[in-house]
Amino acid sequence: MTKSPRLALIDMGTNTFHLLIVEMPPTGSDAEPTVLLRTKVGVKLGEGGISNGEIAPEAYARALHTLAAFQEEIELHQVTDVRATATSAVRSARNGAELAEEIFEQTGIKVDIIPGDREAELICKGMRQAVALGQSPHLLVDIGGGSVEFIIANEDTIFWKQSFEIGAQRLLDLFFKNDPLTADDVREEQAYLAAQLAPLTAAVQQFKPVGLVGASGTFDTLGDLQAAQRNEFRPEMPPPVTEITLQSFYQSYELLLTTTHSQRLAMPGMTPMRADMIVVACILIDFILTTYHLTNSNIRASSYALKEGLLAEILKA
């Protein structure tokens, strides 16, 4: 009997590298792919260099080490096809193409450095696998370390999409001047966001999304913080969709604004890598909720994003 093809999907984000290995269903089958491995590594590719337009030597080395480890898993699982994508940190860095070339030389993995528009499209496809959007437009947001993707979409139409180079690592470099942040620091970031997001503001006025759906690390961590607040068990790999109540978000947000790094690290549910980044990311979430009047419903957090979108696209091909 012919073995089913196995596919590895790698998402090289600015903070986290993800690896998803699946066994594909037989051709013509309606069956879902079988997940063989889902793992992630906090590489912090943007640390120490993203705001200067380069990948710092330590981050560069971590990336190579992580891809070598991913390649071991790929061989172990007898994968027949590998799709690797790199986003904001790699596409905006002077040495991004060099990193992609070195990864290929060392592991044989060919990295596709994708533009922001393509990233937004794949994120939308992935989030739709997790969240039932229905016919009403929603504002989909993926807060990465390097860029933030905003998509206004329902279950079958993308009305508008754009990628902005205002990810959490960039915001951290710009506005994390005091710990905890001062009221002036927060106002400064809000003013910056208002200027940077003028195209989004116009799109929201045109398409009037009814709710906020978030993806990626900050929203995962907010789900972990909410579970800790409620003394609930939260699996290491969260469910496809988690509802984060506005009460829980603002409870977390107020704490994050008034605590130091060491106090945030001690918060139940906190991911150590995000202990600082989550502060500037939550200022962005609060800006979105209040500026675009999206406080009538809770936040839905999707654990599916770019790599699941790429998988959905491959399955439909």
Image (cartoon, rainbow, N blue to C red):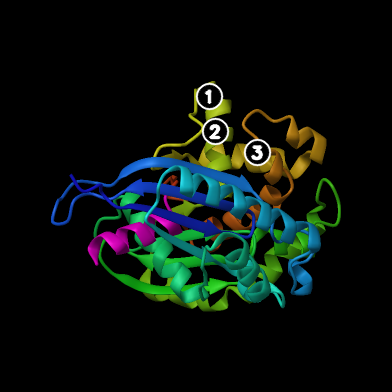
Q: Is residue 312 visible?
A: yes
- Judged from the image, the secondary structure of the residue bearing numbered disc 3 is loop
Type of the residue with mark 1? Arg
- Counting from the top left corner in percent of width and height, residue 218 is at 58, 48
Between marks 2 and 3, how big is the CA–CA gap?
Answer: 13 Å
Name the quadrant of the N terminus: top left
Residue at figure coordinates x 63%, y 51% from the top left = 66
- Compare residues 294 and 2 and report the one nearer the observer: 2
Q: Residue furthest left?
A: 28
The answer to whether residue 282 is magenta is: no
Boundaries of the magenta span? 304-317
- Counting from the top left corner in percent of width and height, residue 246 is at 51, 42
- Counting from the top left corner in percent of width and height, residue 165 is at 62, 71
Q: Which residue is mark 2?
A: 226
- Compare residues 222 and 3 and report the one nearer the observer: 3
Task: Check whether the beta carbons of the residues at disc 2 and disc 1 lie within 8 A of each other.
Answer: yes
Q: Which residue is mark 1?
A: 230
- Judged from the image, the secondary structure of the residue bearing numbered disc 1 is loop
Q: Residue furthest top?
A: 231
Between marks 1 and 3, how big is the CA–CA gap?
Answer: 17 Å
Asked if residue 236 lies left or right of residue 57, the reply is left
Type of the residue with mark 3? Thr
